[in-house]
Image (tube, rainbow, N blue to C red):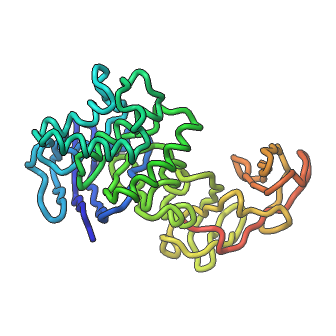
Amino acid sequence: MTLLSISQVRRRFGDVVALDGVSLDIEEGEFFALLGPSGCGKTTLLRILAGFETADEGTVLLSGNDLTRVPAHQRPINLMFQSYALFPHLSVAGNIAYGLQRERLAKPEIRQRVAEVLERVGLAHAAKRRPQQLSGGQRQRVALARAIVKRPRLLLLDEPHSALDRKVRAEMQLWLKELQHEVGITFVVVTHDQEEAMSMADRIAVLNHGAVEQVADPVTLYGSPTTHFVADFIGANNFFEGKATASGLNTSDFGQLPARAGAVAEGSKAFLAVRPEQVTLNGGALSGRVLDVSFYGGLSRVAVSVDQRDTPVLVHQHGAPRVAPGDTVGLGWAAEDAVLVRP
């Protein structure tokens, strides 16, 4: 069931178009990610959902109710800020209880709900500590606990892991996903980190220059991108330019290259995108010379120079490298492993 419906939302800041007709439907209980580079409009959209920004055009419906003129404090939505915005003079329990106290709930109910959420996020032992006595991961948990204790219909998260180091970030991503399933609240997270979005979200909207490029689950986004931007932004890819045909791509430099049908009409300008792990070095449509080989334990990365091509073709092989710089190799891939995308 659709919880949040965003229709043709536009927002300008002077000459800058932050959002250009964004439309999205987000399901109840879904973990939804807004993914894109800096300046693509994702944080502006999040602030419009929270009520901190007003759209120039378009509507935002929550369970069919128009939120356009509902002030932020009256929306059943919570926003967890990128900085966490914890009160340094309050204890962990005090930070979590603050919103409930503002709603003038009875003290016994506040104590009960704070205790429940502290247990849920694993911080019952730290209830009396101040934020400066906590690690980065613990401060994030306090911020999340403060948000979910009010039991919002929708929780918005703005770059929730940006302040954490790599190891803690990976742990918190897993924990956050588990928490979302446990509490059953719909999460919308803004991130520029593709790995974070791919590992956490049920579905992802990829934004570029204020517009939605594609909405899909992580597997579809990786394996079947529809545009050059999405194919380039999500993971590594090798691109070849030409005209779409029934069996792949017709190029001026390399002739016919195999690919499965994509989101491009036959005869139209297109790019063939093939992932490095799908390219083999045992013959195929192309040939080239190995420029560089890098070994990363379980993975070898090979760069191959091909005549008439400005950038090398990247190949990923499992295990130790089986070629060396200077070797001449063939390059190939199965048609089903390459996709045609729009420019």
| Residue nearest the viewer, comparing 207 with 227 | 207
**Residue 254 position within the rendered picture, expressed as x and y whole percent measured from the top left:** 72, 64
Q: How many marks?
A: 0
Q: Which quarter shows the N terminus?
A: bottom left
Query: Is residue 305 something that shows in the picture?
Result: no
**Residue 252 position within the rendered picture, expressed as x and y whole percent measured from the top left:** 66, 63
**Residue 167 position within the rendered picture, expressed as x and y whole percent measured from the top left:** 59, 38
Q: Residue at x 51, y 55 (%)?
A: 198
**Residue projecting furthest to the bottom:** 246
| Residue nearest the viewer, comparing 60 with 270 | 60
**Residue 95 position within the rendered picture, expressed as x and y whole percent measured from the top left:** 28, 31
Query: Is residue 89 something that shows in the picture?
Result: yes
| 292 to the left or right of 33 | right
- Quarter-of-image position of residue 16: top left
**Residue projecting furthest to the left:** 69
Please determine whether, in this image, residue 213 is positioned above or below residue 38: below
Q: Residue at x 16, y 57 (%)?
A: 59
Q: Residue at x 22, y 58 (%)?
A: 8
Q: Residue at x 18, y 42 (%)?
A: 108
- Quarter-of-image position of residue 184: bottom left
| 159 to the left or right of 333 | left
| 139 to the left or right of 260 | left
